[in-house]
Image (cartoon, rainbow, N blue to C red):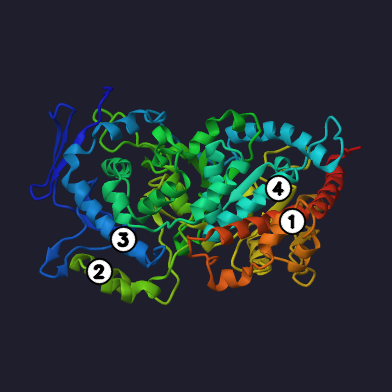
Amino acid sequence: MQTLNWYPTIKSNIERNLLEIYDKNKKLVYKLNIKPYKGVSVSAGFTRVIVYSGVDFYEDIIEQSGKKLSHIMRVGEDFIGQSREFIMESLYAIFGLQRKLIRDTRNIFNPEPYDIIHNDKYAKKDAHVRVGGSVACKQEKNVFYARQNFVKKAQEKFLGIKFGASEKPLVISFVASGGGQRALLCSAGSLFGAQNIGLLDCGTYLSALSGSTWFVAPWMLSGLSLSQWEKRIIDQANKDLVFKASDIVISNKRFLDQLQIKFAFGQPIGFVDIYGALLAARYLEGFGQKGDPNRCYLSSLADTTKMSSGKSLIPVFTAVTAEVALGHTWCEFTPWEFGSREFGTSGAYIPVWAFGRKFESLKTTKNWGSAINPLYEPMQSLGVLMGIWGLAPAATFSQVYDQALKDMKDDLVKDLFKLICKKNDLKKVRFIWADVNNFMYNSNLPLFSKYKYLKLADAGVKLINPIFSTYRRPEQGKNIMDGSSPDVIIIWDSGASESGLYELQAQSVYAFKHNHAFPLIDLDAADRSIINIFTRNPDSAKYKDYEVPTVIYLKRRLDKALLSKYAQDPVFKNMANRLKNFDLEACVKKGQCETFNFKYDEQTAQSLVDMTKFNTMVSIDKIKEALRKRLELNRVRDGAGFR
């Protein structure tokens, strides 16, 4: 096999049906006379793909015949922009980007993209699909076992107990909900509070969805302590996310380098790339290789000593497939793998560094053959992943359609916008998905094998709390099955509903359908306090009591009576003073705390952080009591005890 230390330049001439590939010295090394194309499609990201006798090639999206669009389109049923300005700017940016990438492919691999490709540690590594078996891969299991030694000591300190030599500590998962920038601030406050009372080190898993991923992923990647993040997130919240998206695309060379690489490797390009770059610029500033926020990667977390030694929580990030007919299949991202227990008949997973690559027959495949392209596609950036995880916080097209048309100056963009919107019912809330190469394509796995691309969307369109992403513990001897639930699930809900209990009931319905043990959510028994604890076995004929996790549910609620009770406590005095005039529900319904808003003033941002920090800290006694009761239940399971 020929090994090359360069990457080819690609040039196309659509009119002559010619595809040419040149080496670094501009010498022609490959030439293909392409037969007339068989078909054309446009993804929700507005990327046109033309199929030439088995070769996919990207071309400019628009053909005009007078004023009429003359190409065939495959436009997704639902898509959404984060605001009118974001939709507007993204439309212009993508069209400008498509033209630039198509017309400037001779220079597609200037030194910086070349460096990105060749410094990717997995560029020459094959990837295969792991079918069936455990939800957690071998590397994750190793971290899990290392973590148990760490949390055992933390739980002894937190609960004032001493485990026996053979006793297992509680497996505790923290679950952070969706809710846009509000969820970011609330989940951060909850984590700050958990650390302050000594609870955080007692946990094993941390699962995040939508907006909460925008804090969890950057914090864990940064290596900074939580205390170093509080001022940072308050400052971030006071900046606009949506500025000129076209400026980021056209003027930000680092971002353009990333897209040039995706383009050359035949990967779909769309809204999520721009959205992800905006998120990276905001939340990952100062991190990444060479200080480039677009060069942060989820797989980097797996390489840290903190992770391998068990001193870090195991993070799980979430998305769903956008195909309504397939039921919005739940997907999970960890520092090691991407996949779903619902893919195929028994689950399917790939290394997370191979996410976005082309696969056929369950193994990676290269676009142009190994003699021309000795390297695989570089990893998808963390910014793009954050864009996928958090695509939901956005406005509907029905809210922006009329004004958007008024603001559009380019007739081509206006015509395309009308055509797309005409195909959809604008009265419905829409979400945009991200198209990525489907690793199950052309395989023997059912349902998804016929789709060339996976359409991934914000998991909040299915469930607002990513509870079941933490049903992944390894087998631990007697009565603990592989892939079973944690012992305790602590949920920090940042959703739009004050109580959130109806959303929690939706989780129990999902659990029933998928045979997951989950406690009965009794709305009549739940009170209006900031914390509810659920332990009741929903089906004693089906589950042993110890198989049903204890759920500790912390609501997005500001209890003014409880606040005044702690107003003179030195620990809470400053928080109570800042929160006494904060009207949380008005803020969520009509103010800055709406899910679709990204910009918060300093006082509002600090209030959200203070509220969830306060709620977690003042709940310490109820949390300890629930953990102690759970330990007693585990003694029945294990036949062990503590002193």
Q: Nearer the viewer, residue 3 or 175?
A: 175
Residue 573's mark? 1
- Residue hosting label 3: 89
The percent coordinates of residue 512 (x first, y second) are 67, 61
Q: CA distance from mark 1 to mark 2?
A: 52 Å
Q: Which amino acid is tagged 3?
A: Glu
Q: Quadrant of residue 502?
A: bottom right
Q: Which amino acid is tagged 1?
A: Lys
Mark 1 residue crowding within 10 angstroms, few (<14) / some (14–19) / many (20+): some
Mark 4 residue crowding within 10 angstroms, few (<14) / some (14–19) / many (20+): many
- Residue hosting label 2: 408
Mark 2 residue crowding within 10 angstroms, few (<14) / some (14–19) / many (20+): some
In contact (CB < 8 Å): disc 4 and disc 1: no
Q: Which callout, 4 or 1, points at the residue further toward the start of the chain?
A: 4
Q: Nearer the viewer, residue 43 or 540?
A: 43
- Residue hosting label 4: 194
Q: CA distance from mark 4 to mark 3?
A: 40 Å
